[in-house]
């Protein structure tokens, strides 16, 4: 994996110099407060082909985000049985990728591309709220719910690090921030969205294959399917530029690594029984958690279907805040995510598992933000 630490350090240094000269950059001025969440569920934003009660009724559809000009496409995956992990004889295999175990997955939809800055900025920068306040945006029935979701404090430097915004994948968010985005998206649309589990992600990446990569075992073919260290030119690329896998999903290998919901446990697979349904290793500590897929800054072996990438505190070592931000991994411009939507939605009480965190440090900072403190 390459190091872009000099670029990050230079940008942080420039930010601090600018801050001293002008008191503070515009992005960092002023706290954001949030409202109380109304009771019940937000009203459903009707979208053609998005409704289904049975797996055979599921169709691809385009989700539009009310109050914005943004949207994204999803495809249905039927789930079923598949082998999680890699075989013992796979090239470049890591010990934590085994033992392979057969698991069962329930049907779900998944975004065909990684979440873009176009979509994420609506949440991160509260652009939907700003437009309404300026009289340039229409109100939606879901707004009272969406406006009550905690959003990131403004970053001190642009988190795209000048690599591109329009059509490019959003990066540098913590898993907590990605989960809050899925909560906000759910409130905006009235449909339940979340991060994928490790098992769901690998199933989607493999797209029916059993080889190192979804297109086969030959690493020499990787440049035709993925952006990584050898061909990425030290930057991420626009979402969906390269061909999709057999499920129609772009950038499952490379471009940016993608958050999953699970805590990283190198022995987790050995705890699963054959046929385990919808397995997930719920996190109870801040580190390590799982990212998948590798990125423009990773070597070829890290892009394999079964490769598991554990998060580390080093992903936010340049963060100048004390305590460090719950929203940004300043040193992870290789890290993004995509969303899934299960066919069977959880109860309102169960959604807490998918969206929230029980970590005391995170709850303290979020409470301060709700009270208007940065």
Image (spheres, helix red, strand yellow):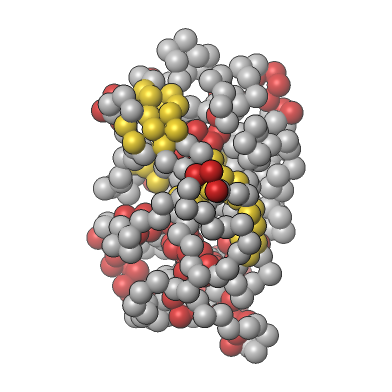
Tell me where residue 60 appears, x and y as whole percent: 63, 49
Residue 244 makes an appearance in the image? yes
Residue 124: which quarter of the image? bottom right
> Which residue shows up at 73% across the image and 38% down it?
242
Tell me where residue 368 appears, x and y as whole percent: 33, 74
What is the number of callouts on the image? Answer: 0
> Which residue shows up at 26% across the image and 57% down it?
358
Tell me where residue 286 appears, x and y as whole percent: 32, 49
Image: 227 above or below 166: above
Residue 303 makes an appearance in the image? no
Q: Which quarter of the image is occupied by the N terminus?
A: top right
Tell me where residue 19 appears, x and y as whole percent: 56, 71
Left or right: residue 281 versus residue 172 is left
Residue 264: which quarter of the image? top left
Image: 31 above or below 202: below
- 134 or 373, which is in the foreground? 134
Left or right: residue 20 versus residue 166 is left
> Which residue shows up at 43% across the image and 12% down it?
88
Residue 11: which quarter of the image? bottom right
- 320 or 216, which is in the foreground? 216
> Which residue shows up at 41% across the image and 51% down it?
344
Q: Residue furthest top?
A: 89
Q: Which quarter of the image is occupied by the C terminus?
A: bottom left
């Amino acid at each position: 994996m390459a190091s872009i630490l000099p670029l990050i350090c230079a940008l942080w240094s420039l930010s601090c110099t600018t801050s001293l000269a002008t008191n503070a950059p515009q992005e960092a001025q002023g706290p954001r407060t949030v409202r109380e969440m109304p009771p019940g569920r937000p009203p459903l934003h009707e979208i053609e082909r998005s409704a289904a009660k049975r797996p055979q009724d599921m169709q691809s559809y385009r989700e539009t985000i009310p109050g914005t000009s943004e949207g994204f496409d999803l495809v249905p995956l039927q789930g079923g049985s598949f082998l999680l992990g890699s075989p013992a004889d796979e090239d470049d295999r890591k010990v934590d990728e085994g033992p392979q175990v057969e698991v069962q997955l329930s049907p779900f939809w998944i975004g065909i591309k990684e979440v873009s800055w176009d979509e994420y900025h609506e949440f991160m920068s509260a652009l939907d709220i700003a437009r309404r306040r300026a009289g340039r945006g229409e109100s939606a029935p879901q707004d009272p719910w969406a406006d009550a979701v905690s959003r990131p404090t403004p970053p001190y430097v642009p988190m795209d690090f000048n690599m591109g915004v329009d059509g490019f994948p959003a990066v540098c968010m913590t898993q907590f921030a990605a989960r809050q985005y899925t909560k906000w998206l759910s409130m905006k649309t009235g449909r339940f969205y979340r991060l994928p589990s490790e098992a769901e992600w690998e199933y989607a990446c493999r797209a029916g294959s059993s080889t190192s990569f979804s297109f086969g075992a030959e690493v020499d073919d990787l440049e035709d399917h993925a952006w990584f260290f050898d061909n990425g030119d030290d930057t991420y690329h626009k979402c969906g530029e390269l061909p999709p896998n057999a499920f129609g999903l772009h950038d499952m290998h490379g471009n940016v690594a993608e958050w999953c919901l699970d805590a990283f446990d190198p022995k987790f697979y050995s705890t699963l029984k054959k046929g385990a349904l919808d397995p997930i290793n719920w996190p109870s500590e801040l580190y390590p958690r799982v990212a998948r897929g590798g990125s423009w800054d990773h070597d070829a072996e890290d892009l394999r279907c079964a490769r598991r990438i554990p998060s580390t505190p080093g992903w936010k070592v340049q963060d100048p805040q004390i305590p460090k931000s719950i929203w940004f991994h300043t040193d992870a411009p290789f890290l993004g995510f995509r969303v899934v939507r299960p066919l069977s939605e959880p109860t309102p009480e169960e959604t807490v598992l998918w969206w929230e965190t029980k970590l005391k440090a995170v709850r303290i900072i979020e409470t301060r933000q709700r009270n208007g403190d940065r």
